[in-house]
Image: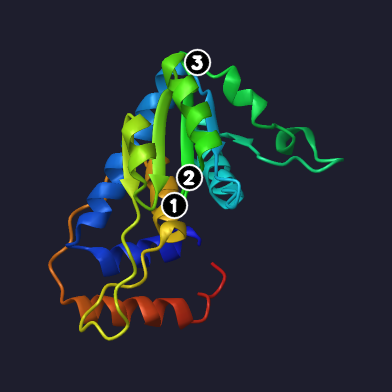
């Protein structure tokens, strides 16, 4: 999802809690890593690897000039021949400590093994952040957490667009690299904003300037 689509999605969500919540969490992430010059470790569950978020944070680090946002992706399974930046295993969490930030991303249960490693990292002084589906045990360990909302029933009148964990990750990563908040916009009906989003996503690209 590029910057234009993020902006259009924010148009749809204007007036809901999710713009503020994703910016709040992004601020916590940024506030944890920038003062320490980086040290961001990104880990998922055994069933979910947040490589997409890793790539987006890397992009935001480059675009914003905040190299501290560039994460180290910690993997449950490292395939043979993986390049160095994709060859960091769970053993890295044992060394996590003060001045480092551990961002855990898990749509489902993180698993007892990962929770134990997260607990040890926090005990050693690392800041723990969680972006997930609302796991109580993980939230109990996190200094700050944001749970993606459950998908609304298809038949719900005026239901918000699917705000699954992937979408929330896009909003958080984009907000983490922002230098300032956009100017407030006037109130619009939800269906009008949704129609504008659909038009924007299907419109042809603008002519080359």
The mark lying in front, picked from 2 and 1, is: 2
- From where the camera sits, is residue 97 visible? yes
- Of the numbered discs 1 and 3, the one sitting upstream in the chain is 3
Quickly name the residue at label 3. 97
> Residue 173 in the image: x percent, y percent?
44, 46
Q: Are marks 2 and 1 in contact (CB under 8 Å)?
A: yes
> Residue 170 in the image: x percent, y percent?
45, 54
Quickly name the residue at label 1. 169
Identify the secondary structure beneath mark 2.
strand
Is 105 on the left-hand or right-hand side of 162? right
Q: Residue at x 36, y 30 (%)?
A: 141
Q: Which mark is residue 138?
A: none
Q: Residue at x 55, y 44 (%)?
A: 44
Quickly name the residue at label 2. 105
> Residue 175 in the image: x percent, y percent?
37, 46
Q: Residue at x 47, y 58 (%)?
A: 166
Is 209 on the left-hand or right-hand side of 128? right
Q: CA distance from mark 2 to mark 3?
A: 19 Å
Q: Are marks 1 and 3 in contact (CB under 8 Å)?
A: no
Between 29 and 97, which is closer to the camera in this rendering?
A: 97
Label 1: how many residues lie within 10 Å, few (<14), some (14-19) or many (20+)?
Answer: many
Quarter of the view holding residue 190: bottom left
Is 85 on the left-hand or right-hand side of 124? right
- Of the numbered discs 2 and 3, the one sitting upstream in the chain is 3
Q: Residue at x 56, y 34 (%)?
A: 71
Label 2: how many residues lie within 10 Å, few (<14), some (14-19) or many (20+)?
Answer: many
> Residue 160 in the image: x percent, y percent?
27, 72
Between 165 and 120, which is closer to the camera in this rendering?
A: 120
The mark lying in front, picked from 1 and 3, is: 3
């Amino acid at each position: 999802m590029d910057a234009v689509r993020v902006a259009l999605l924010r148009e749809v969500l204007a007036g809901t809690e999710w713009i503020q919540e994703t910016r709040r969490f992004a601020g916590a992430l940024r506030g944890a890593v920038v003062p320490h010059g980086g040290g961001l470790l990104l880990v998922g569950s055994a069933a979910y690897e947040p490589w997409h978020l890793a790539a987006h944070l890397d992009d935001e680090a480059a675009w914003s000039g905040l190299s501290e946002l560039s994460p180290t992706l910690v993997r449950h399974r490292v395939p043979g021949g993986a390049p160095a930046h994709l060859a960091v295993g769970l053993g890295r969490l044992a060394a996590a400590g003060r001045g480092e930030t551990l961002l855990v991303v898990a749509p489902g249960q993180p698993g007892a093994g990962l929770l134990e490693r997260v607990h040890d990292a926090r005990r050693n002084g690392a800041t723990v952040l969680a972006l997930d589906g609302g796991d109580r045990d993980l939230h109990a360990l996190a200094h700050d957490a944001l749970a993606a909302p459950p998908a609304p029933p298809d038949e719900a009148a005026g239901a918000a667009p699917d705000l699954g964990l992937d979408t929330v990750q896009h909003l958080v990563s984009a907000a983490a690299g922002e230098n300032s908040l956009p100017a407030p916009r006037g109130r619009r009906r939800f269906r009008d904003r949704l129609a504008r989003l659909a038009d924007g996503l299907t419109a042809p690209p603008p002519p080359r300037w």
